[in-house]
Image: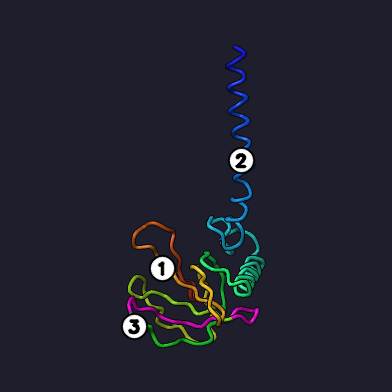
Amino acid sequence: MRQSGFRRYRWVLVGLLVLAAVTPLVKQLGGAGGLFPSSVPGSDTGDGVASQSRAETTLKHAFETHREAFWIEAAGRVERVLADDREGSRHQRIIVALATGQTLLVAHNIDVAPRLASIAPGDRLRFRGEYVWNAQGGVIHWTHHDPGGERPGGWLELDGRRYR
C-alpha cells in the first residue's frame, strides 16, 4: 500500500515539474502573433481596436528587432497595388500601411488562392499570414489556405469577402 501511494505521489510530482517547464514555452508561443489560433490578434471576441493595436505593436517590434516567421492577423490601408510577381508561384503584391506608419508588402499567392479583383488604394485590407522581416517594413505571405493541409493557412479580407 505504501509503495502505491508513493508511485502516485511521484507521478503527481513529475506532472507538476513538466507543467512548470512547459508553461513559459506556451506563454512565449501564445503571445501576439504566436502559434495558437486564440492568440492571433483579431481572432478573439474582445475589442477589435485593442486587437489591432496589439498586432501593430507586435509588427513594429518585429521590424525593429528583425524578428520573423510568426503568424499575425491585422489590418491596414492599401497604399499601392503593384504588378504581379510572375517568377515561380504567381503573387499579387499589395503595399499596406498600418496606423503606425509601418508599411508591409502583402504577397498573395494567386496560384493557390483567388485574386482580389477590385482592390484599390485607400481600401481597408484585413489579413492573416506569416510575417517575414525586410528593410522596407516586412512581408506578409501565406495569405491562403495550405494545399497540403499541414497548417491553418491565412487569408485576405476585403469588403467583407475572405480570400483563401
Element carrying mark 2:
helix
Residue 15, x across and y down, in percent:
59, 34
Amino acid type of the residue that numbered disc 3 sits on in the rendered structure = Arg
Disc 1 or disc 3, which is closer to the eye? 3
- Inspect the magenta stretch and tell me whether residue 99 lies in it: yes
Point out the stretch of residues depicted in magenta: 88-102
The residue under the point 53% across, 83% down is 78
Q: How has the structure been colored for display?
A: rainbow
Res 111 label: none
- The residue to which callout 1 is attached is 144
Number of numbered markers: 3
The residue under the point 32% across, 77% down is 88
Res 86 label: 3
Quarter of the rendering occupied by the C terminus: bottom left
The residue under the point 64% across, 71% down is 61
Give the left or right position of residue 67, taking residue 85 as reference: right
Element carrying mark 3:
loop
In the depicted structure, whether residue 4 falls above or below residue 102: above
Residue 21, x across and y down, in percent:
62, 43
| Disc nearer the start of the sequence (1/3) | 3
In the depicted structure, whether residue 119 falls above or below residue 128: below
- Inspect the magenta stretch and tell me whether residue 9 lies in it: no
Res 19 label: 2
Q: Nearer the viewer, residue 12 or 57?
A: 12
